[in-house]
Amino acid sequence: MTTMPGTMRQMNLAGAWAMALCAAAACAMALTTGTGCAALGYAADKAGGGGKAEFELADDRPVVLLVDRDEEAMIGRETLDRVGRDIAAKLMAGGVEAPVIESQRLGALRTKMGAAYDDLKPQEIGQSIGARTVIHLRVRQWVSNPVISSGDITSIDARLRVLDAETGNVLWPANSEGKIIRFKTTPDAPDSGPGQLASRAAAPFLGQ
């Protein structure tokens, strides 16, 4: 009986060493992938739903979602508007408290101005409808390629930026050209492009 406390201490010490060795091994693995030990904490946060947003939208600054395209992108105005509405819905569902200006006001401005609307800068559009922040998503490529007996694969390339509507300054990301969003749909879901684009565009503001 007198040997039990010593034995228990040895077992506890062995367990502590085992945990330390596991942590060291995990850290070494992270280092070999170039992510570093900090990636372990980040992964734990993500697994627990505690990811930090890349850009936090202030709750006292009205936001407008502006989705447009380059001339080469084969995507219609109706689909662009759908993407904008989907992004707004995802932001609100994700708990973003910044007031998002309704897409109807953007549509009314477009109707009122006609062809002159296309000459407006993103910040000018934001100013015209009372926004202080502009989330600008520009689709640079939208090309569908048929796959024999499988449907279509759509290649999508877009840039995402946040602008100050008062000054036109880029608030995010540090690269003023914008965050790259690039992906391809799969043949089994050829119509998933708008939904995927909206999800990827909303993710930086939701910590996903």
Image (cartoon, rainbow, N blue to C red):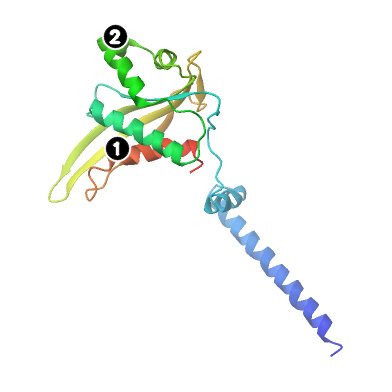
Mark 1 Cα within 10 Å, few/some/many (few <14, many 20+)?
A: some
Q: Does residue 163 appear left or right of residue 140 in this picture?
A: right
Specify the quadrant of the image occupied by residue 18: bottom right
Image marks 1 and 2: residues in contact by CB distance under 8 Å: no
Circle 2 crowding by C-alpha within 10 Å: few under 14, some 14–19, many from 20: few
Please tell me which residue lies in front, 123 or 4. 123
Residue at 44 percent of width and 28 percent of height:
100
Q: Which image quadrant: the N terminus?
A: bottom right
Type of the residue with mark 2: Ala
User: Which of the 4 quarters of the picture holds residue 111?
Assistant: top left
Is residue 192 placed above or below 111 in the rendered structure? below
Which x, y percent locates residue 155? 27, 37
Mark closest to the chain's N terminus, 1 or 2 = 2
Horizontally, residue 148 falls left or right of residue 98, namely left
Determine the secondary structure under disc 2: helix
The single residue placed furthest to the left in the displayed view is 149
Q: Which mark is residue 131?
A: none
In the shown orientation, is residue 33 left or right of residue 180?
right
Residue 143 spot, x, y in % from top left: 23, 34
- Judging depth in this view, the residue of 28 and 198 nearest the camera is 198
Across and down, in percent, residue 39 comes to 58, 49
Classify 208 as above or below 66: below
**Residue sitting at x 53%, y 38%:** 53
Q: Is residue 89 above or below residue 148?
A: above
Nearer the observer, 85 or 141? 85
Residue type at the position of mark 1: Pro
Q: Residue furthest right?
A: 2
Q: Residue at x 49, y 26 (%)?
A: 175
Residue position marked by numbered label 2 in the rendering: 116
Q: Which residue is mark 1?
A: 194
